[in-house]
């Protein structure tokens, strides 16, 4: 069944995206004091991740996930041409 | 059956080109308008004229777009004809999303709370990952008009949809009252009208728009409002950065300002004049606490001290203004015991609050302020609790973002599922422009205050301090506490709402920028109010009236009813806002918790878990809401007083989480009940299975290729 295979890939990509999302969110919220041991530019790293880095990763997750979904959908529609 | 198939990709491309041209011209027009006003300011136009012109011109533009987009067509009214291209839906969502609280409040919170305020930045951006991965594409694939309609189709029966309508109404209504409050605040700042008149002037702009053209008018106005609000927000940030660091890219240059601020914080902490002020404040706090022990006696003592002071001044032939000051204090003193008790309590709280280092502002870049991971048991516990609350608030705001009905409805308006996904990326991009700038603005304003303002003699303070403290002393106030004639940080009080609105004046920018910023805040509040009003009235007319009361009603009648409801809800919200509840802004976060608890489990499990059924969904939503409300009532200061909760606060806390983040408990409880109840009752029926199959069909909702 193509539909179920499609859905399996969708689930896989979604779980991967969510894992990355949670990793970044938790990492920044929980370990910011630890991250501050490093510096990015002239900012403490924890502060940089919370104000800029995390937002960049969130945007990246959405864009990459969207691309992957588009590709999956194109593949499925090529397999089952429109009536 | 409605046709969820939108226009073809070719049509969308052509439409996007038309829109690019129109909004390009519009943006140019905005810039010319601002330039013109700044020339008029040079030519000596009075303040109030510039403010009034900004107010009238922007509201007139929004109303004109609303008028041009008026419609009675059902699909146009509910989902803007599903023709909105990804990038423009992104802008509209950004304006829909960013409320008065985002525009005015975020930088203020960052100024006042430092790192702790970043929970809002993280939460309000990261939530879009959940929208993109879990919700928007699937909602668009089914192609309904409202969120309760989705719940009704996925779970079947009456109850899921009814509970959905109730939850949409409660969540959005709480939120819209706050927006209208913001409209009133900004309009009165722009024009000098009273707050109540401000509310109704602003409301006119909202109504013309959503009343005449529904989602279609709201969409195109929101795009226009986004353009104004982002220009308004970024102008002072870039300008301040140019003034302070010489770079036009604050994102890369404010790191050095942060370093300066941190250095200055250390210096101010040990400054002898600051310490002297703190000691004075501690004396005041002790004094107020002493008075609170016997209010009646303290009132009599106050009268005596003040009269003695007045007599002494008269005897010494002091300047009449000082004597008048004492006499005024004597006249305005609290008359009843209850009033006096409240006044002493307020004195006590203010003095304790400000007697802390740096006037109560935590160090800007320090992640967890309370406690110490290497200290004793109590300090370790405080530290743990600090970061646990930060994480809980971040997650709660994210889940709430992903469940706000007025934002989710926006993704119904795109031409296809793929465009819906792309549109979430654009939304986050446009939202991030503001949220990346907010911490920079907070840091640069703090730099300005710490280095240029603190230490000035009182008779040389800049004009904005006097003007704002006259407008509202709870926003700005200064007082020479240690009597040295110089301003110490602990002698200056800045409210959170003033940071953005007064940033241009604090940085010494022209007056036009001040009013541009106010117009941007107005755009943010109006656009969110528009989206919310429409969501409430659509739920009531489409889901309640059409589905349950009069299913035979023709489309035209439904649209008319929806318009009428917009009017009623708007007036109700304006009435509530005009009562000016003191703690109104605290209810913004309440709206997020409620939305998360009510909708998140039912929506996400409905899409990803086939076994979720009607009983589970209804019980899950009610449990989520219930847990959330109970936690707020038992833990929130204001609500505890309102409901007379006497149980000790420590016994009501779960894992020490603040009531702001009560949504996390609501979501977990709601999801658990949903799963359990679904497993104990039969599987969803064939109709619901068909809905699930359609949601998972990659070929449905692809846009205008006619495949359906």
Image (cartoon, rainbow, N blue to C red):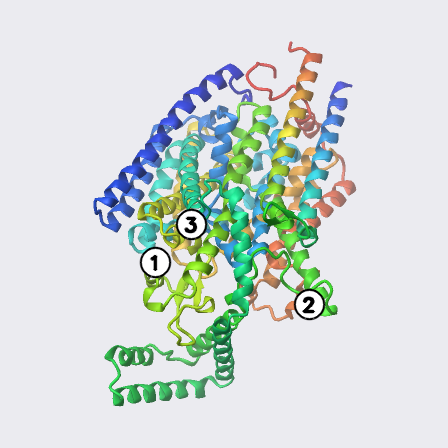
Q: Which residue appears at 60% of the width and 15% of the height?
A: B707
Which quadrant is home to the C terminus of chain B?
A: top right
Where residue B609 appears, as percent x and y from the top left, is 73, 35
- Residue positioned 44% across, 54% down in the render: B499
Q: Which residue is labeled 1 in the image?
A: B464
According to the picture, the residue beneath numbered tag 2 turns out to be B651
Secondary structure under badge 1? helix
Find the distance from the CA under tag 3 to the CA under tag 2: 35 Å
How far is mark 1 from mark 2, CA to CA? Answer: 46 Å
Task: Please report whichever mark, 3 or 1, sits nearer to the chain's N-terminal start.
Answer: 1
Q: Residue B75: x and y, percent?
A: 47, 26
Q: Do the residues labelled 3 and 1 touch (CB within 8 Å)?
A: no
Quadrant containing the N terminus of chain B in the rendered view: top right
Whether residue B146 appears in this view of the structure is no
Residue at image x 61%, y 58%? B659
- Which residue is more in the foreground, B201 or B508? B508
Q: Quadrant of residue B462?
A: bottom left
């Amino acid at each position: 069944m193509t539909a179920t295979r499609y859905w399996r890939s969708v689930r896989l990509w979604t779980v991967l995206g969510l894992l990355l999302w949670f990793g970044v969110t938790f990492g920044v919220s929980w370990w910011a004091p630890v991250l501050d041991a490093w510096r990015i530019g002239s900012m403490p790293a924890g502060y940089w991740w919370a104000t800029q880095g995390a937002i960049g990763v969130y945007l990246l997750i959405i864009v990459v996930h969207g691309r992957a979904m588009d590709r999956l959908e194109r593949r499925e529609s090529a397999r089952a041409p429109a009536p | 059956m409605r046709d969820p198939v939108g226009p073809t990709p070719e049509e969308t491309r052509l439409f996007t080109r038309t829109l690019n041209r129109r909004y390009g011209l519009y943006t140019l027009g905005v810039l010319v308008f601002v330039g013109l006003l700044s020339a008029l300011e040079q030519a000596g136009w009075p303040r109030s004229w510039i403010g009034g012109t900004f107010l009238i011109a922007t509201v007139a533009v929004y109303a004109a777009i609303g008028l041009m987009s008026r419609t009675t067509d059902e699909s146009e009214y509910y989902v803007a004809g599903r023709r909105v291209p990804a990038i423009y839906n992104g802008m509209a969502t950004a304006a829909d999303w960013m409320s008065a609280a985002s525009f005015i409040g975020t930088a203020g919170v960052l100024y006042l709370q430092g790192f702790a305020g970043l929970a809002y930045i993280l939460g309000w951006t990261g939530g879009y990952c959940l929208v993109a991965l879990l919700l928007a594409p699937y909602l668009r694939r089914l192609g309904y008009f409202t969120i309760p309609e989705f719940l009704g189709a996925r779970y079947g029966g009456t109850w899921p949809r009814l509970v959905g309508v109730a939850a949409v109404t409660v969540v959005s209504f709480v939120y819209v009252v706050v927006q209208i409050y913001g409209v009133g605040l900004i309009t009165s700042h722009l024009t000098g009208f009273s707050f109540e008149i401000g509310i109704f002037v602003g409301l006119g702009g909202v109504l013309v728009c959503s009343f005449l053209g529904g989602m279609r008018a709201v969409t195109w106005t929101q795009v226009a409002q986004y353009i104004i609000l982002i220009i308004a927000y970024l102008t002072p940030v870039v300008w301040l950065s140019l003034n302070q660091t010489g770079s036009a890219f604050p994102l890369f240059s404010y790191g050095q300002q942060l370093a300066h601020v941190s250095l200055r914080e250390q210096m101010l902490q040990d400054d002898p004049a600051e310490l002297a002020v703190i000691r004075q404040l501690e004396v005041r706090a002790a004094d107020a606490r002493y008075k609170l022990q016997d209010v009646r006696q303290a009132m009599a003592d106050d009268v005596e001290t003040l009269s003695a002071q007045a007599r002494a001044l008269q005897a010494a032939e002091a300047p009449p203004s000082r004597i008048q000051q004492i006499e005024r204090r004597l006249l305005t003193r609290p008359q009843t015991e209850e009033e006096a008790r409240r006044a002493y309590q307020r004195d006590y709280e203010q003095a304790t609050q400000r007697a802390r280092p740096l006037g109560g502002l935590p160090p800007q870049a320090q992640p967890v302020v309370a406690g110490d991971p290497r200290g004793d048991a109590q300090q370790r516990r405080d530290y743990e609790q600090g970061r646990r609350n930060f994480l809980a608030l971040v997650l709660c705001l994210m889940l709430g973002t992903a469940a706000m009905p007025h934002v989710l409805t926006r993704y119904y308006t795109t031409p296809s599922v793929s465009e819906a996904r792309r549109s979430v990326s654009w939304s986050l991009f446009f939202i991030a422009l503001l949220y990346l700038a907010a911490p920079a603005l907070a840091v640069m304003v703090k730099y300005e205050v710490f280095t240029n303002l603190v230490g000035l003699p009182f008779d040389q303070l800049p004009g904005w301090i006097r003007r704002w403290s006259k407008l509202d002393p709870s926003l700005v106030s200064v007082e020479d506490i240690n009597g040295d004639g110089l301003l110490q940080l602990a002698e200056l009080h800045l409210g959170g709402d003033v940071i953005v609105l007064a940033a241009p004046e604090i940085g010494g920018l022209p007056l036009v920028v001040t009013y541009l910023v106010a117009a941007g805040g107005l755009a943010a509040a109006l656009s969110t109010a528009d989206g919310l009003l429409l969501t409430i009235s659509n739920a009531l007319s489409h889901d309640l009236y059409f589905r349950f009361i009069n299913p035979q009603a023709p489309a035209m009648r439904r649209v008319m009813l929806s318009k009428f409801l917009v009017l009623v809800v708007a007036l109700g919200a304006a009435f509530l806002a005009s009562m000016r509840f003191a703690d109104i802004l605290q209810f913004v976060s309440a709206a997020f918790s409620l939305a998360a608890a009510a909708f998140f489990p039912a929506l996400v499990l409905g899409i990803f878990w086939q076994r979720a059924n009607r009983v589970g969904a209804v019980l899950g939503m009610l449990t989520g809401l219930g847990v959330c409300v109970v936690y707020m009532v038992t833990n929130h200061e204001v609500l505890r007083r309102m409901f007379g909760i006497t149980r000790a606060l420590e016994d009501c806390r779960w894992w020490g989480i603040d009531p702001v983040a009560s949504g996390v408990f609501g979501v977990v409880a709601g999801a658990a009940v949903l799963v359990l109840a679904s497993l104990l009752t039969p599987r969803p029926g064939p109709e619901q299975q068909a809905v699930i199959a359609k949601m998972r069909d990659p070929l449905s909702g692809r846009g205008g290729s006619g495949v359906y």
